[in-house]
Amino acid sequence: MLLISSLKKKTKLIAIASLDSPKDFYIPLEGYRYSMGLVVEVGTHLKKYELVAESEGVFPCKIHAPVSGVVKGIVSIDGRSMLHIENDFKETALPLSPLDLRELSLSGLTDHLLDRGVQGAGGSQFPTHLKYQVEGKRIDTLIFNGVECEPFLSADFVLMKERYLELFRMAMLLASVLMVNRVVFAIEKQHKELRNVLLKCASGLGMELEVRLVPNSYPQGGELQLIESVTSMKIRKGFIPSDYGVLVTNIGTLWAMYNAVFEGKPYIERVVTVSGNSCSNLGNFLVRIGTPVAHVLNQTKNSCDLSSQTVVIGGAMMGKAVDSLDSPIHKGAGGILVLKKNRVLVNNCIKCGLCVDVCPQHLMPLEFVRHNIANNIEGLDSFNLQDCIECGACAYVCPSDVPLMENIFEGKSKLF
Amino acid sequence: MILNPFIKPRFNGTQMVMIDVIIALLPLVFVGWLAYGGVLIQLIGIAVLSALLADFLFSSLLLKRFTSVLDGSAIVTALLLVFTVSPITPWYVVAFGAFSAILFGKVLWGGLGKNRFNPALVGREFMSVFFASIMTSPNIWKFKDLIQTPNSNFFKGLEDGFLSDYFSSVLFQTKGAMGEYSIVCIALGGLYLLLRNRISWHIPFSLLATFTLLNWLVGDIGLSYSMGGILLGTIFMATDMPSSPTTKNGKIYYGLMIGVATFAFLKGGIRYEYMSYSILLMNGFSDQVSLVFKPNAWGVVGDWKGRLEAVFMLSLKIGCAILAVLSLYYYDLIHFLVFIYIVYVVLKFNYSFSNKVNNVV
Ligand code: SF4
Ligand code: SF4
């Protein structure tokens, strides 16, 4: 079990604030597994909320215009293609149509979620409507994942603190559509002050809610680890939790679902924590998808220098470092972190076994390095590389700075 | 491209690990200094210098790593080596021991972390093989006149004479090798390492438990062993990271088998080196132990029958190895093991390890 000092105190009490919108938006065109194709032409004038790109197939996704403006074309940032939209600052918007709740069916709900482009806000950006396509399965437990085990991030915490009414309305709707009795909000022990607030409000709404406090360890917010903490079921990676009667939804996703269902709004904005050990002005902000990091940092009066600092989209453990400050916020990005550069001093593995100790999936990370270097695919497979959730815990504790993540990613690319 | 994670814990490098081990050894240095004063400091100085020199020379020459001497592991090896010998060991023998500990125990394997055997113990075996007449003569353990602070009863106030004797012998007792004088100080170092998470409780616990249990059930080895020696080996050598298993259950099994081997060796009449032999023997199996006790991945149902069979076969192998060592000891052939070892590492280095110097595992 790995404890990382959470460093959330810095931001968790700061209320959600809004930012001015930037002139240039870069809409990420990566869907889930497949990239999305444009449905608008270059040069068209867009209205806010208009669909701009979608992907089809097994994992369909959609993305919408966060502002009104002109489609400028496709650019590549950090090796990914983005749709450049120039803001006209008029905010002319399409009319919003909330979901009709009177004759609500599960398929009606999932269709609506797809149409509004709701995807997992916890990081993986898994299309939410697919998660809820559970016709014919019996769901016993709905878990809402408020466990942001990543250090620094507090976006889900402030959502729970400030927008619990919205969250509860959506949670109640889901519970009634799926006919679930057990609704669990999972939060970390360090946020236990939230428990009574949530319980009180839930009882006021006549909702049966269980608030589960889970340890502050990392990666407690991982779907499989959380399911175990709440239901004591250990589900192997690659199996689908709803087959076991459990559905886990991130708090950020729940809020996006609320906006989609009750207000009819596509997923065009989310709460993002700006923090980091080298960041001067911290806070939680409502940021539109596609906003470049540089703009957010400017607006919050932070300066940064990529030669001595690392700027990360997402969390410090699992996020992605950016090469260009034009990189935009995507649907799964809970934070922008400005961090001191890690000093990396690679030594031989000293077989301390710490990586084995902390691995939440009970793997032996050092063996991945051995077998990846030797190009031994069977070896990688027999040590269950495919079960790795890429949480980074092993690389975090390694005293020798063995390039564990490099070898894990490389090894995975050889496996599939 | 920088990969996640983007933060690291503070004070977490290999160097820091070694510094912690050195800190944990300081109480023992102090006790040794109480007992012998300058003599001990001289010996330590010689061992450390010789180890650092060997490390710098051969790491640069053979591994092309010019800074690995700074990681501090040579100092740890030298200190541990000094703690396993008698204070009147001639200085050149100690220097030779430290030198070969680094060369044959570490560098020829490919550097820190790749060594299969504990370097300090390897150095010690080299000393007893190449300076057999000095190291195994009974005179080497006769050093009464050197002692500056004799055993004294620190607990005179206690009424019960037996208890006060016992307490003071735990605190300070000038018998045997230099690291064995103070059980309290060894335990203190162990506690520090545990608190800093540099060692886990698994190996020391299962080793001591097994040894005590066997002693109690079978008994009959009298007082031929030194508790201080066993504790020193348990806390500082059996837990040596590179040469011990990486998995938790593996560590428990490993400690258990060291306990069994130590007991068997004592029972078989090995006088001084029971602890070194049993640790070195299990060092040789530590990779296999790690793998046999590979944890089941999350949500995977383990095949416990297969696991049981593997453990049984491994125990059988270890049992045979214990018997083999005992027979070699009877026929006074242990030194051949060291010769075979030398040939093995040198050949391995030339044909295999040297090509993989840049691999981190
Ligand atoms: S990144 Fe993979 S191997 Fe490393 S600790 Fe996480 S799950 Fe285990
Ligand atoms: S944590 Fe690093 S040094 Fe320790 S066993 Fe794992 S890879 Fe090796």
Image (spheres, coloured by chain):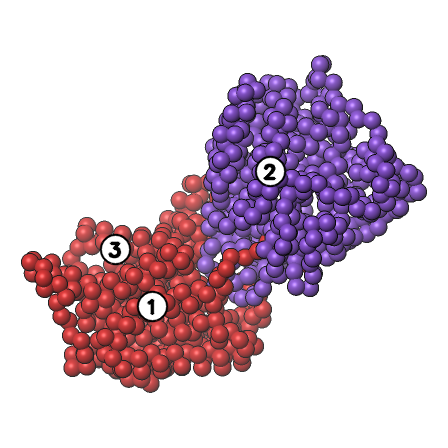
Chain colours: A purple, B red
The residue wearing badge 3 is B211
- The amino acid type, in three-letter code, at marker 2 is Val
Q: Is residue B351 left or right of residue A57?
A: left
What number is the disc on residue A158?
2
Mark 1 Cβ and ligand 2 under 8 Å apart: no
- Residue at 22% of width from left, 75% of height from top? B35
Front-most of residues A317 and B173: A317
- Near mark 2 (Cα within 10 A), the count class, few <14, some 14-19 or many ≥20, is many
Q: What x and y, as percent, mark residue A387? A: 57, 44
- Residue at 48% of width from left, 48% of height from top? A3
Disc 1 is placed on an element classified as: helix
Task: Give me the chain letter of mark 3.
Answer: B
Q: What x and y, as percent, mark residue A113? A: 73, 28
Front-most of residues B40 and B320: B40
User: In which quadrant of the rendered view does residue B82 lie?
Assistant: bottom left
Q: What x and y, as percent, mark residue B61? A: 54, 80
Distance between the alpha carbons at the discs numbered 1 and 2:
48 Å
Front-most of residues A397 and B359: A397
- Residue at 67% of width from left, 41% of height from top? A17
- Residue at 68% of width from left, 28% of height from top? A258
